[in-house]
Amino acid sequence: MHPLNFKKIQVLRGLKIKMPSVRRMSLKEGEAVNIDEYPNFHKSGSIKGMKKMYYGKDAYLVKSGNYIYNVPKEIWEKAN
């Protein structure tokens, strides 16, 4: 990784903090946890922009099918 690529790492007061990454979940797994009840955006949208403007930098995002969902940590931990 290039040292200036801060896509997944944020520098805060000299400390490197890893931000939650986007995890994947199959459509079947998503249906089992009612993932369609959570806020979402299309996979072609900007993850960085959505976190910055709407969800916050520590949002837990899961991609299922053609959409990326902002889910609670419990569901995010179940995803791959």
Image (cartoon, rainbow, N blue to C red):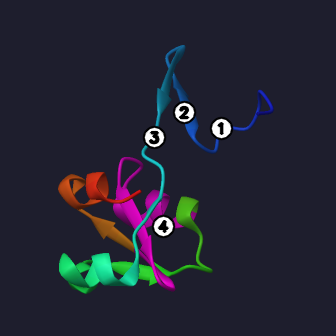
Q: Residue flagged by tag 1: what amino acid is it?
A: Phe
Look at mark 3 in the image and give the residue it sits on. Answer: 19
Q: Is residue 41 above or below residue 60?
A: below
Q: Contact, CB < 8 Å: mark 1 with mark 2?
A: yes
Of the image marks 4 and 3, the number of the one nearer the N terminus: 3
Between 61 and 46, the residue placed more toward the observer is 61
State the quadrant of the N terminus: top right
Q: Residue at x 19, y 55 (%)?
A: 74
Q: Residue at x 42, y 49 (%)?
A: 57
Q: Contact, CB < 8 Å: mark 3 with mark 2?
A: yes
| Numbered badge on residue 49 | none
Q: Secondary structure at mark 2?
A: strand
Percent coordinates x, y for residue 6 in the rendering: 65, 38
Percent coordinates x, y for residue 26 in the rendering: 40, 76
Q: Contact, CB < 8 Å: mark 4 with mark 3?
A: no
Mark 1 and mark 2: Cα distance apart in space: 6 Å
Look at mark 2 in the image and give the residue it sits on. Answer: 10
| Numbered badge on residue 50 | 4
Look at mark 1 in the image and give the residue it sits on. Answer: 6
Mark 4 and mark 2: Cα distance apart in space: 16 Å
Q: Of circles 4 and 3, which is in front? A: 3
Dot 3, crowdedness within 10 Å: few (<14), some or many (≥20)?
Answer: some
Q: Is residue 8 above or below residue 40?
A: above
